[in-house]
Image (tube, rainbow, N blue to C red):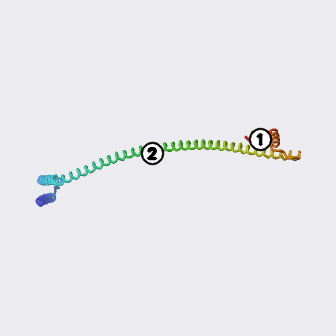
Amino acid sequence: MLSAISATILAATEGGAEAAEEGGSFLVEPGIGLMVWTLVIFGTAMALLYKMAFPAIAEALDKRQKMIEDAITSADRTKAESEALLEEYRERLKEARSQADEIVASARKAGDEVQRSSAEAGAAKRDELVEQAKKDIEGETRRAIQEIRSEVADLTVAATEKVTRKTLNAEDQKRLVEDALGELDFSSLGERNN
């Protein structure tokens, strides 16, 4: 079939060449045969293209269109997923910040509570130590007063024995010591220490 078409084209070309030699241009004055054959060849080429090439081209274009549509759909889906993930991360970040603020507030509150309780415990311990120190001072003062009384009694007995140059019996010693101690004011010693 192609050889027949080529032969026809060659014959038409030769006829055009003869017409050109005769003094006219076959392009300016075309022959009817050449036009018919050109239209037949063009129609045949179009029919062949329509039967063989156009379906393959259309199929390739359809595949390409489908691939592009799938890519767009996939991109839209990925974009939607990304936006959802971004929103989820933003929510989580908000929650994390909120939790961090709560933890900081709780830590501050706990720190204030510990500081307050430590101050209270320190004050209570200080008061307890002051009270214990007062008791110890009172005890030491009483003991010191007792020692002073004992010393005064011994000194009074010794001084009396030296002055009177005689030994006193137990009853005389007791009376003399009580008189001497009665004259001394030991209550002022205890009050000064308080």
Position of residue 122 measured from the top left corner of the image (x, y, whole percent): 62, 44
**Horizontally, is 36 left or right of 130 in the view?**
left
Name the kind of residue labelled 1 in the image. Leu
What residue did someone put label 2 on? Answer: 96
Q: Nearer the viewer, residue 72 or 44?
A: 72
Position of residue 39 measured from the top left corner of the image (x, y, whole percent): 14, 52
User: How crowded is the residue under tag 2: few (<14 C-alpha within 10 Å), some, or many (20+)?
Assistant: few
Q: Nearer the viewer, residue 34 or 90?
A: 90
Residue 132 visible in image: yes
Q: Quadrant of residue 143?
A: top right
Position of residue 188 measured from the top left corner of the image (x, y, whole percent): 77, 39
In the rendered view of the protein, which quadrant contains the N terminus? Answer: bottom left
Name the kind of residue labelled 2 in the image. Ala
State how far apart marks 2 and 1 are (Cα): 69 Å
Position of residue 25 measured from the top left corner of the image (x, y, whole percent): 17, 55
User: How crowded is the residue under tag 1: few (<14 C-alpha within 10 Å), some, or many (20+)?
Assistant: few
Q: Is residue 12 above or below residue 135?
A: below
Q: Nearer the viewer, residue 58 or 18?
A: 58
Circle 2 or circle 1, nearest the eye = 1
What residue did someone put label 1 on? Answer: 189
Q: Nearer the viewer, residue 110 or 160?
A: 160
Q: Is residue 41 above or below residue 181?
A: below
**What's the residue at 81%, 46% (across, down)?**
154
